[in-house]
Image (cartoon, rainbow, N blue to C red):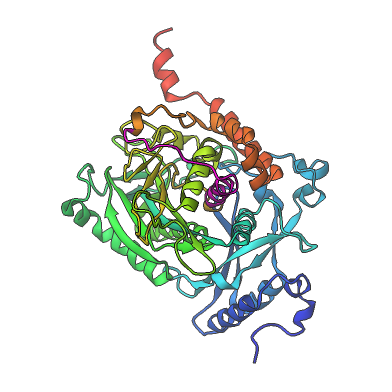
Amino acid sequence: MSNLPAAPSSSFVERHGLWTPEQREAAERALAVLGQRDMHTLRLAFADQHGLLRGKTVVAGEAAAAMRAGVGVTTTLLAKDTAHRTVFPVFTAGGGFGMREMQGAADMLMVADPATFRVLPWAPGTGWMLCDLHFHDGRPVPFDTRALLRRVHGRLEQAGYDFVAGLEVEFHLYRLLDPRLSPTDAAQPGQPGAPPEVALLTQGYQYLTELRYDQIEPALEVLRRGLVDLGLPLRSLEVEFGPSQCEFTFQPQAGVAGADLMVLLRSAIKQIARRHGYHATFMCRPRLPNAMSSGWHLHQSLRDRASGANAFVSEDPQRLLSPLGERFLAGLLAHARGATPFTTPTLNGYKRFRPNSLAPDRVTWARDNRAAMLRLPCAAGDPASRIENRVGEPAANPYLYLASQIVAGLDGMTRALAPGPSADAPYEAAARTLPTGLADALAGLLEDEVLCAGMGREFVEYFVHIKRAEIARFEAEVSDWEHREYFELF
């Protein structure tokens, strides 16, 4: 007997044909789990414009109806910057978007993707699903970044390929001393609350030593157990270069699954850490003494949909990549500056682009060289041949990061671009520099017609508006640097 509510033809999902047969089967399996005695709630979440999970929780008995009918959330969630400040005039005509559906803080619907169902191991009795966003007439919300990646990947599928992403993610893990939850520490929109007070788990700068790993192992074991129980394809855990810094890597994922993995990973790590007295942050460069910048290195290749083979593998002993792979590489280089707001979307992330720092500072490629923006850890005949983009920060919206890579690579394929020679000394190469800040990066994006068309001009203008609002708020603050520099001097 079906666990889904009667008369499904009258439901929102059925009326608009929003589930595939595979998703309907996944819904049956999920509801069977939620019907068990020890299950009491289902969290429904979507990734917002910043790649942060937002949503609502329903009791298990309401899960079937919520999945079929969708769950309403306010459209203003898509109008906010990283400090939760609404930066569009949502109560004006068109809500600042020129769209009636976004006006007046109206609702949109979260529609569950049952294929993403999981039981959260750190929250007993709790199920979880990712959702897609739709208006009440069934149309996808154009600012839903998961849907954007699905559309972009669809163009790659039409060309006969799947995008394969391997995640290599650095982050900081601290002991939580004071969560700063007094009323005076509370936040306001546009003015975040006081950051937590933390202590180191390692002193750092003993990269990959077993001593430092063993110091942080009790905390990493808590995370490892939770991620494995969640079903995430964890591959390795490493102690990184800086104090209290670590790195996790994961098995490659095809299509949208790689981005889904990243949003769930970040949320899971932060939740598990907090429940065990730790604070995890994916901020690129914390303002703490001796902190080292964190990066998100995105390993990428294309899989031939017909044969399942890695389309980047070279058959020529003199070449690192196949001709297709070289064209894809050239596209990434051609659009590197324009894609930077999607790979590095925070003001803080640009503090990482420094010479001789294991992070790139200019648009280069090289074989197995960690100073290059694009590193090629591959050889002719190697089935693991791939391109590693080292420009990203771990706070990036995964759907936008992956989509920007596909748009750029497809352009290289379409126009048969050539990548040019490798940069054997990347910090000395005569190459274009990466943007020096977020404002510079946004200008580069708006000048890149290929990225604007591929990501959607409407979406790009929306994204730039949010990021410029963040920049304006930052520039209105008096910094510690200014106070130290001028207060006594003048």
Q: Is residue 343 above or below residue 213?
A: above
Q: Nearer the viewer, residue 188 or 214?
A: 214
Outermost residue to the bottom: 1
Q: Nearer the viewer, residue 2 or 369?
A: 369
Residue plotted at (60% across, 59% down): 159
Q: Quadrant of the C terminus?
A: top left
Hey, which quadrant is residue 371 in on the image?
top left
Q: Nearer the viewer, residue 163 or 105?
A: 163
Residue plotted at (50% across, 72% down): 118
Q: Is residue 57 above or below residue 103?
A: below
Hey, which quadrant is residue 54 in on the image?
bottom right
Q: Is residue 415 magenta?
A: yes
Q: Is residue 469 visible?
A: no
Residue 235 percent across, percent down from the top left: 34, 63
Q: Is residue 153 magenta?
A: no
Residue 188 percent across, percent down from the top left: 58, 41
> How many numbered marks, from 0 up?
0
Direction from residue 205 to residue 349 in the image, left or right: right
Residue 119 percent across, percent down from the top left: 48, 73
Residue plotted at (77% across, 83% down): 7
Q: Nearer the viewer, residue 164 or 457?
A: 164
Q: Is residue 165 above or below residue 14?
A: above
Q: Quadrant of the N terminus?
A: bottom right
Q: Is residue 196 visible?
A: yes
Residue plotted at (20% across, 54% down): 215
Residue 9 percent across, percent down from the top left: 78, 80
Outermost residue to the left: 211
Which region of the structure is painted magenta?
401-425
